[in-house]
Image (spheres, rainbow, N blue to C red):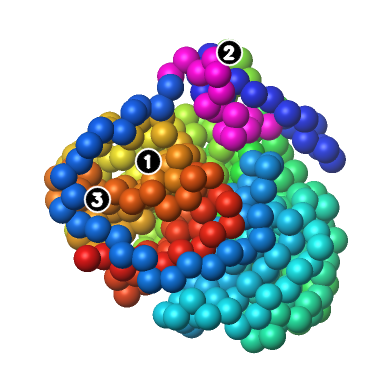
Amino acid sequence: MFPLLASLSACSGFDAAVLNPGNWFDDEEVNPPKELVRIEQEVQLNRQWSVSVGNGQGRNYTEITPALDAGMIYAASQNGNVAAVNAETGDIRWRTDLEIAITGGVGAGDGLVMIGTEDAEVVALDQVTGEILWRQPVSSEVLSAPQTDGEVVVAQTVDGKLLGLNAEDGAQRWIYETSLPALTLRGTSIPVITSTGSVVAGFSNGTLISVSSDTGVWQWEERVAVPEGQYDIDRVIDVDGDLLLDGTRIFASSYQGNLMAFDVATGRIVWGMEASSYHGLEQGFGNLYYCSDKSIVTAVRDNSEDVVWENTDLENRALTAPKSIGNYIAVADFEGYVHLISQIDGRIVGRTEVDGDGVRSNMLADNGRLFVYGNSGRLTAYDLR
């Protein structure tokens, strides 16, 4: 049995049991996180502003990640607070208290700010004012950020459904369903709406599917991983990490499976290698970067299986997905440290403590600025120096 996956919890509304990564570091942990060692600070993160957004990730295992759109950051907390923050100054444009438990978000664009709830709803707010525009019941809890192209809002639920909702009023336009394995990780990847009018989404059964954004009609389906092993826990192959769209290719990662690239139009496999990750990938310097399920950060030459470098200094520290900023890769850990890793050789060259409660949501980067949303609800902007 994989020692980090020790905690099971029942999931209401369907039969699959859920593995909760929030309990991976308990008192009986077989593979404890590596202790940090002193590094030589070659680069530092200079804090520019910081604001508080509700209770952050709350006490349950959520991963609510802010969204960046047109110079504004939209952040939400588990206890229902949603805020629009100027990315340059940190000034708050609006705050809205929805008084509901938020578990999925944040999506932003085309005039909408979208979140998903524990009570199985998708809620859309006005991007300028924060006013609630509509709320639509769905089949089960939403754990990832809904997305929109201005015509349709796409949301994924934990019971294996992908839904298309009318962007104007939230009315359901179509639904796509998959079967769930007996055991899954707690989380879902964020659906991607492409410029060619398709929606690509990853599921807990290890598949990646493409449907029409307008009608939900199936276009293609491919496997990122194939379940193996005698026991259910060995057969967990969730595609939970955010998908990476790069021109005509879309990249996906799976737990206990593979990293794969597919042709967006046809689903044809164009690249792949064996790896286990429940995070998305990042690009930079001609490399692909990923964090394994053991928090080993690896750089692979794009379109090959050649490992450029591998960093094991942060092993078992529950890292976030890697984020490229300048010449560095940034990752954050369960103790609230942000680590800057050289894209050239994989050395840790900078470190800053940002939140004593840890960091679970993926970071954002724009124009050399890094945005970190800590578990306590503190959203902070840093510049490199």
Return the residue at label 1. 291
Could you say which quadrant of the image residue 163 lies in? bottom right
Q: Is residue 178 above or below residue 115?
A: above
Could you say which quadrant of the image residue 313 lies in? top left
* Pointers 2 and 3 in contact (C-beta within 8 Å): no
Query: Which span of residues is magenta-colored?
Result: 18-31
**Which residue is located at x 35 percent, y 44 percent?**
290
Return the residue at label 2. 230
In the image, which is nearer the foreground, mark 2 or mark 3? 3
What amino acid type should be assigned to the residue bearing mark 1?
A: Cys
Query: What is the C-alpha distance between the residues marked 2 and 3?
Result: 43 Å
Judged from the image, the secondary structure of the residue bearing numbered disc 1 is: strand
Q: Residues within 10 Å of mark 2 (few under 14, many from 20)?
A: few
Judged from the image, the secondary structure of the residue bearing numbered disc 2 is: loop
Q: Along the polypeptide, which appears first: circle 1 or circle 3?
A: 1
- The numbered mark at residue 350 is 3
Query: What is the C-alpha distance between the residues marked 1 and 3?
Result: 18 Å
Query: What is the C-alpha distance between the residues marked 1 and 2?
Result: 26 Å
Residue 155: percent from left, percent from top: 68, 60
Quick one: 81 or 296, which is closer to the camera?
81
Q: Is residue 246 left or right of residue 75?
A: left
Residue 34: percent from left, percent from top: 35, 27
Main secondary-structure element of the magenta-colored stretch: loop
**Which residue is located at x 59 percent, y 57 percent?**
377
